[in-house]
Image (cartoon, helix red, strand yellow):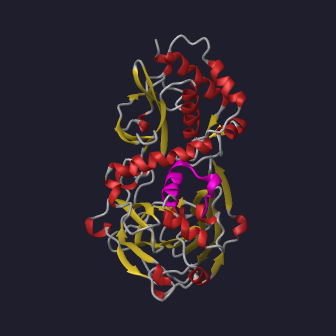
Amino acid sequence: MRGTGEILSLVLAAFLVVAVSPAYAQDFGEINETERLAGPPDAMPEADAVILFDHGLATTELRGLEFKRHVRAKIFQPSGAEKLGEVAIKRLWYDKLMKVEAVVHKSSGETQELDRKLFEEVKQGIDCITYIRFNDLSPGDIIEYRYVIEYYGGKDLLGPEKYFLFSQQVHYSWYKSRMKRSSDIDQDLYQHVTNLPSWYFDSPVFTLESKLVCKLGSDLDYSYTTVNLEAEEAVPEYHRGQGFVQRVYKFYTWQLKNIPPFDPEDTATYHDRYRKAVHFQLFSTVGANRMVGANYGGGTFRSIGKSFQGYLQDYFKSSRRIEDQIKSLTEDASTTRDSIQKVCDWIRLELDTDSSSGYKLRPMTKSLKELFKKKQGMPFEANLALVYALQLLDMDAYPLLISTLESIDFRKTARFDHLLAMVSTDEGLLYIDVASEECQLGTLEDQFIVDEGVIVNFNQSGVIGIEPEPCRPVEDAS
């Protein structure tokens, strides 16, 4: 789900608080007798550990999105301690991790609180990962942890997949007029656009209960897609908040029980093809179901492409030096293909494309000028640099949004995780990923071989069928 704030009246804004749904609430540290005596579940008597519960709450409002998680698990065997002994909390570097707590309830009755100063934080690309490590666990021990993440973003950090949602929303005059009347609201706050992380119900050990609650403001609507959920499991329970203030919120709850574990060593499972999950897309802050109906037609993707141009206008800021260098690259090129190859080689020489945190449309830089100054960016930023360079050389080149997530239908979620450069030549269309240095020009690594994408070209934007060629290694070139 993509999240953004709703605009509330000043009276309501004064009373708004982040409240936990009763369906989510669970007292931290309150271990009951049933949990202390719990053994392996009947459905899996050989289980070496069990997740007693895994609860999540995502709240969207004016300032962005807040995500809470609370997990409790019990160890039965040393192998279970090994599976659950390390917890990795992942977020983007500009999101805020708060209120991290972790304890071990020993089988002897003693409670050991983990010192947050000992939690390790590692930066991986644009991701930050905080590791909680439970050491010296014994059979019968219960571990528990909870945390809160405030997903920020801000206009300066908007990536393509966030920008088009934001720009669709502020185009509505009613929305904008409400912003102008709300003089006490920080005008920067309404630009905090973000996305709700996908929720996976299963874990490496048997899970007794996994529950996610999505708490949306009154003008927010969403679409979702599920993976490996039965029909009755895929439809969330719905209720309105209680009371004058909480009535503006809508609650959607997904809950599964007695979930078998997945094998993290299984490559296919690792890529989320067989895990039980729900993925979201937030659509609109104005009008119930305004964008949901359009999502299945071409209108949504045309809007995405048109709005994307706003992002490009901000991002395609370079310098005369960069422009002159690009033009000088191709002075002795004999063919269009040769010109493209020279530009690709130059970008690869100038930039270190960091894909260590995976392929995602989250920028490391605010503009091409900053990109070439820092000399490091995400792979999609390198591809945007290629599009810019080829357009500067009067070629028909466009960004092409794609989704490599096989379990997520972008036609239902408008969710993309990468961007290719597409250029028209006398030989036909070429699809290029600059970071794929081992592939010949116009051929792509297997993960980028998809049937459709969304071309970004003003009013001509929309879904197109594509036929990219699989990677041909550079050393095989004749």
- Comparing 144 with 243, the one in front is 243
Quarter location, residue 380: top right
Q: Which residue is drawn at 50% across and 52% down?
A: 164
Q: Residue at x 46, y 60 (%)?
A: 198
Quadrant that contains the N terminus: bottom left
- Comparing 301 with 469, the one in front is 301
Give the residues in magenta. 151-170
Q: Is residue 99 left or right of residue 73?
A: right
Residue 274 position in % (x across, y down): 35, 54
Q: Can residue 47 be seen in this view?
A: yes
Q: Is residue 152 magenta?
A: yes
Residue 51 position in % (x across, y down): 46, 71
- Comparing 376 with 99, the one in front is 376
The residue most toward the left is 231
In the rendered image of this protein, does residue 375 appear above or below residue 328? below
Residue 233 position in % (x across, y down): 31, 69
Residue 174 position in % (x across, y down): 49, 67
In the rendered image of this protein, does residue 438 appear above or below residue 15? above
